[in-house]
């Protein structure tokens, strides 16, 4: 801003020097040279408004599912075996076998769930495509009902309904999202979900077993595993909160509490069975 005024003043001074015999002209020239500066400042482009939204909710959900199960199930298994077995080697063998089986089962479950969502979306889309051809008036009324729920009158939504009639694919997209509440699945989502859940399960499962890799005495390793697992739950919860917009401390404490209760329940059940 300072540079703009300096340039304008210098320009006014040069022009005024050529009109020294006319003081009024000098004043007028100075005002005319500086006045446009205010217009430039007033209408200067503002910093664009950039909205940042977190849109990777499905990926976070998969990580949460895999990591939470990985932190609790292997820990409960190791803790349950510790009461009957003093050797960390045997507990590690059983623990890693459980991690392998659990990651495969969890990944398969995520794959089948994502495939089911994609198949459901495709089935409902075909139904909507048929209905806008066979019963267009009914579908148009449903569009008006949707807008009415947002406070729009039939007259206000009539032009939108007519426009959608001219664009069948957009009409179907509108009905899928606002009538059925279904979003188009991401291509390859099933495989990504399976791999994400399985990998998160493996990472989570290794954490409580790491104590048994360091200490040969299983009973000593158990208490270290408890502390490591609780810390891991807190860190994981904090990271989850950072990505989802939840306060980090609250998310960490919440995850630690819920995960700790789940691990304690699994531990008690495993000890009762053993």
Image (cartoon, helix red, strand yellow):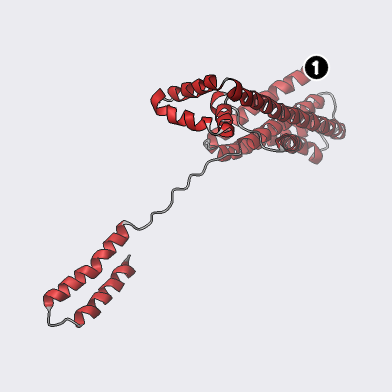
The residue depicted at 68 percent of the width and 33 percent of the height is 62
| Image coordinates for residue 132, horizontal then vertical, percent | 58, 24
Q: Is residue 200 visible?
A: yes
| Image coordinates for residue 53, horizontal then vertical, percent | 53, 41
Which part of the image, by quadrant, shows the C terminus?
top right
Pick the front one: 130 or 87: 130
Q: Is residue 138 above or below residue 237?
A: above
Q: Is residue 39 above or below residue 192?
A: below
The residue depicted at 28 percent of the width and 64 percent of the height is 37
Residue under label 1, please give it.
273
Q: Is residue 230 visible?
A: no
Q: Toward which corner of the image does residue 21 lie, by quadrant?
A: bottom left
Which part of the image, by quadrant, shows the N terminus?
bottom left
| Image coordinates for residue 172, horizontal then vertical, percent | 58, 29
Circle 1 Cα neighbour tier, 10 Å, few/some/many (<14 / 14–19 / ≥20): few
| Image coordinates for residue 182, horizontal then vertical, percent | 60, 28
Pick the front one: 29 or 189: 29
Residue farthest toward the top in the current orientation of the protein = 272
Q: Is residue 210 above or below residue 271?
A: below
- Counting every numbered tag in the picture gives 1
Left or right placement of residue 99 versus residue 8 in this view: right
The residue depicted at 73 percent of the width and 34 percent of the height is 190
Disc 1, SS: helix
Q: Toward which corner of the image does residue 66 lie, by quadrant?
A: top right
The residue depicted at 28 percent of the width and 69 percent of the height is 5
Q: Toward which corner of the image does residue 269 lie, by quadrant?
A: top right
């Amino acid at each position: 801003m300072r540079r703009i005024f300096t340039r304008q003043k210098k320009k006014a001074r040069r022009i005024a020097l050529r009109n020294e015999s006319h003081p009024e002209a000098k004043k007028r020239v100075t005002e005319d040279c500086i006045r446009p500066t205010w217009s430039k400042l007033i209408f200067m482009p503002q910093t664009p408004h950039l909205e940042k939204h977190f849109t990777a909710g499905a990926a976070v959900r998969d990580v949460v599912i895999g990591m939470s199960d990985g932190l609790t199930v292997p820990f409960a298994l190791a803790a349950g075996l510790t009461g009957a077995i003093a050797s960390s080697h045997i507990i590690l063998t059983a623990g890693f076998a459980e991690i392998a089986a659990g990651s495969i089962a969890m990944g398969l479950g995520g794959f089948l769930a994502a495939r089911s969502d994609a198949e459901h979306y495709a089935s409902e889309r075909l139904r909507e495509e048929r209905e806008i051809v066979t019963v267009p008036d009914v579908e148009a009324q449903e569009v008006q009902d949707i807008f009415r729920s947002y406070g729009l009158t039939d007259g206000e939504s009539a032009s939108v309904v007519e426009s959608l009639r001219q664009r069948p694919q957009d009409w179907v997209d509108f009905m899928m999202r606002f009538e059925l509440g279904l979003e188009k699945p991401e291509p390859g989502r099933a495989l990504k979900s399976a791999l994400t859940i399985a990998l998160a399960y493996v990472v989570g499962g290794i954490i409580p077993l790491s104590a048994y890799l360091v200490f040969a005495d299983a009973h000593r390793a158990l208490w270290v595993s408890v502390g490591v697992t609780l810390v891991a739950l807190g860190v994981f919860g904090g990271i989850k909160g950072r990505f989802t917009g939840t306060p980090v401390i609250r998310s960490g404490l919440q995850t630690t509490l819920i995960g700790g209760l789940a691990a304690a329940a699994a531990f008690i059940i495993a000890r009762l069975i053993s």
